[in-house]
Amino acid sequence: MTKKPGEIVSVRVKDLAFDGKSVAEIDGKILFLNAGLPGELVRAEITRSKPNYDIGRTVEILEKSDKRIPARCAHFEICGGCTWQDLDYELQLNYKRKQIDDCLKHIGKFETIDLAEALPAPDQFHYRNKMEFSFNHEDPDGFVLGLHRRGHFDEIFDLTECHLAPDVITDIVKWFRAFVKESGMTVYHVARHKGFLRFFMIRRAFNTGQIMINIVTVDGALANAAEMIARIKAGFPDVVTVVQNINNSKSNIAKGEKEIIHFGPGFIEEEILDCRFRIYANSFFQTNSRQAETLYRTAFELLEPDKNHKLLDLYCGAGTIGLTVSKLVNEVVGIELEQTAVDAARENANINGINNVSFHSGLVQELLIKEPGILKGIDSIITDPPRAGMHPKAIKALVESGCPKLVYISCNPSTFARDAMMLTQSGYDMGKVIPVDMFPHTMHIELVSVFTKK
C-alpha cells in the first residue's frame, strides 16, 4: 500500500546509500531516510512519495545498532556538520567505498571495477583548515553565531565546540560572539534584509599555523575596529590578517562584492608538497591540508609523469595541483573559470619560482572548443571538476584530442560515474579507482582514477 506524506511508519534500516542516506523498505518500495544505521529499527515520517521510492525523516531510533559509538561533540544531535560521528571510523570508510561502488554499477553501468580500499585520513578530528559560521537574528534583540541545525537551512545554533576544526577556531568564535554583544553591532535578518553582520569565516593553515579572520557584512564600518584588532593580536597571535567582505545582495552567501583589509596582508600562506600557496578570503583551497597531500600524491602515482610530458590541468583553481606536479613534467597548462583564481595561480607560480606553467581563464568546454591549440601536444590530463562533474562538451573535446591518459579527481561519485561511462564509451579504459577520505565523520568522499586510451 502506498504511503502518503505525513504518515508515520516503523521500519528497519538495511543499508546506507549515496550521500549517506539510510535505506529502508516498505512493502517492496525503497524508503530513503536522513538518519539511521543498518540494522536499526526507526520511526519515520514520510515526507515525499514518488513512483519508485519514498523519502522520509527519521523521528526516533527505536533499536540502536551495536556499531554506534558515543559521539564526541556536544552538538552532535542538532548539528548538520558531521552526521557519522557516532559510527566507527572503519565502518565509515567501508560505507564510503560502497557509495562509489554503487554509483559506478548503477549510474555508470560498470560490471567490473578495480576499486581500492579507502585511504584513511591521518587526522580523524581537528582537520579542517576553514570554517564558515553564520549569524542569525533572534527576536527580540538577541542573536546566535554558529552552524546550521541539521535539516534546517534557516536555523543556526550557538556553537561552543567543534571537533572537526582546531580548538583555536572555536576559541576565536566564542571571543567574537562576546565582542559583538559588547560592541552593539547588529546581526543581519535574512527575511527582513536588515542588520549588519552576516558571516564569520576563519582559515587556519596547518603547515604554517597562520590564521585569517574574514567578517562578512553589509556595507558599513566595523564598530570599534581598532580595539577589535588590538584584542585579536593580544589574544590570538597566530592571526596574521583580518578582512571584511561586503555583501549587500539578498543572496545569503559568505562572499562579498568588495573587500576591506583591516590588518595584515589580506591572505595567509600554506605549504603543500614543498610549494607555498597564498590563500585569500574567497580562494578555493582543499579543506584538509594534510590529506590533500595524500590526494595529490595518489593522483601523481596514477599519472606516472614524465619530464618530457606536457600536462593539461583542468578546473585548476589557484594552481595547487599544476604547481605541485610541475617539477615532474616539462610543461603545465591550467584552465579555470574564475579570474581571481587564475590571478592567484599566477601569483603562486611566481612565489615558488615556477616558470613552466601557464594559466587560462574561461569555461573549460568553451576554451577547449574555441582554442583547440591548448590541446596541442598534450600528453596527459588531470581534471578536478566541481561536484557537477565535467561538461559533456569538455569530455568530447578531450576524447577528440586523442590524449593517451587522463587522471580524474572527483568529490562526487555520482557525477564521476556518469563521466566515467562517457569516457569508456569513447575509447578509454578505466583503471584503478582509489577512494580518499578527506572528511571523516561526514558522508563525503573523494576519489581518484585513471583513464587510458585503448
Image (cartoon, helix red, strand yellow):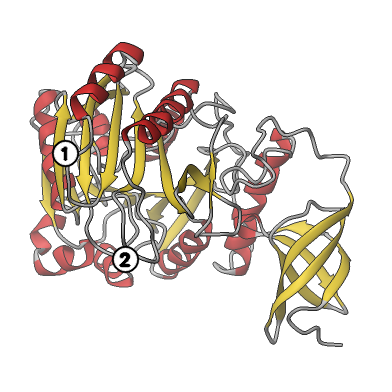
Q: Residue furthest right?
A: 63
**Is residue 132 found left or right of 382 in the rendered image?**
right
Amino acid type at circle 1 is Ala
Q: Image quarter for residue 215?
A: top left
Rate crowding at label 1 as few (under 14), some (14 to 19) or many (20 or more) other CA atoms within 10 Å.
many
Quadrant location of the C terminus in the rendered image: bottom left
- What percent of the width, then of the height, locates residue 341? 18, 45
Q: Earlier in the sequence, mark 1 or mark 2?
A: 1
**Is residue 94 found left or right of 208 in the rendered image?**
right
Give 12 or 301, whichever is nearer the viewer: 12
Relative to residue 358, is residue 50 depicted above or below?
below
Give the residue displayed 44% in from the left and 49% down from the top. 141
The residue beneath circle 2 is 395
The residue beneath circle 1 is 345
Q: Under tag 1, what secondary structure?
A: helix
Give the residue displayed 27% in from the left and 35% down from the top. 320
Give 22 or 199, whichever is nearer the viewer: 199
- What percent of the width, then of the height, locates residue 35? 72, 56
Count of picture labels: 2
- What percent of the width, then of the height, locates residue 445? 54, 46
Quadrant location of the N terminus in the rendered image: bottom right
Measured Cα–Cα span from mark 1 to mark 2: 24 Å
Q: Under tag 2, what secondary structure?
A: helix
Give the residue displayed 16% in from the left and 53% down from the top. 257
Give the residue displayed 59% in from the left and 28% down from the top. 124
Give 202 or 364, whichever is nearer the viewer: 202
- What percent of the width, then of the height, locates residue 163? 57, 29
Amino acid type at circle 2 is Ile
Give 331 or 342, whichever is nearer the viewer: 342
Relative to residue 91, is residue 218 depicted above or below?
below
Q: Image quarter for residue 4?
A: bottom right
Relative to residue 136, is residue 133 depicted above or below?
above
